[in-house]
């Protein structure tokens, strides 16, 4: 696959994943972190870092708005639930076994 085409395909996959996360508001970030080791916030950080590598400055809130599709405080108020103790324990175990940056 040509480099340009590969980049276009990867960008399309990223956009589809972000759209999927936007529609699956029932899936909490802690669930994503437990199962995959990354979440919407991680994607926001990676987005910000990739933009910075290309000379585009975004703050964390701007990057999160790209991923969440709205300001994070708004998303949090509408969709984020308090994590039960068993999920917090599972998250801590997953973090210990597979630390992230």
Image: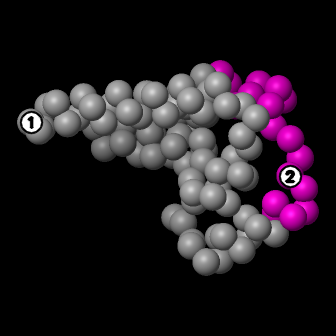
Check disc 2 and report the residue beneath it: 83
**Residue range highlighted in magenta:** 70-88
Circle 2 packing at 10 Å, graded few (<14), some (14-19), many (20+), is: few
- Judge left or right: residue 18 versus residue 50: right
Check disc 1 and report the residue beneath it: 2
Q: Residue at x 54, y 66 (%)?
A: 100
Which of the 4 image quarters holds residue 26? top right
For the residue labelled by badge 2, is the local secondary structure a helix, a strand or a loop? loop
Residue 86 x, y percent position in the rendering: 87, 64
The secondary structure making up most of the magenta span is helix
Residue 8 in view, yes or no? yes
Extreme-top residue of the structure: 70
Q: Residue at x 60, y 48 (%)?
A: 39
| Alpha-carbon span between mark 2 and mark 1 | 44 Å
Which of the 4 image quarters holds residue 20? top right
The tag earlier along the polypeptide, 2 or 1, is 1
Q: Quadrant of the N terminus?
A: top left
Q: Residue at x 82, y 60 (%)?
A: 87
Extreme-bottom residue of the structure: 97
Residue 37 vertical position relative to residue 52 in the rendered view, above or below: below
Does the magenta segment cover residue 75?
yes
Residue 98 x, y percent position in the rendering: 56, 73
For the residue labelled by badge 1, is the local secondary structure a helix, a strand or a loop? loop
């Amino acid at each position: 696959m040509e480099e340009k085409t590969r980049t276009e395909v990867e960008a399309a996959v990223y956009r589809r994943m972000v759209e999927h996360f936007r529609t699956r508001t029932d899936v909490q970030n802690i669930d994503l972190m437990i199962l995959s080791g990354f979440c919407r916030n991680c994607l926001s950080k990676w987005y910000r870092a990739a933009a910075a590598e290309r000379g585009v400055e975004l703050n964390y809130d701007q990057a999160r708005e790209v991923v969440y599709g709205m300001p994070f405080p708004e998303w949090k108020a509408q969709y984020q639930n308090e994590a039960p103790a068993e999920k917090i324990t599972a998250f801590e175990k997953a973090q210990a076994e597979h630390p992230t940056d």
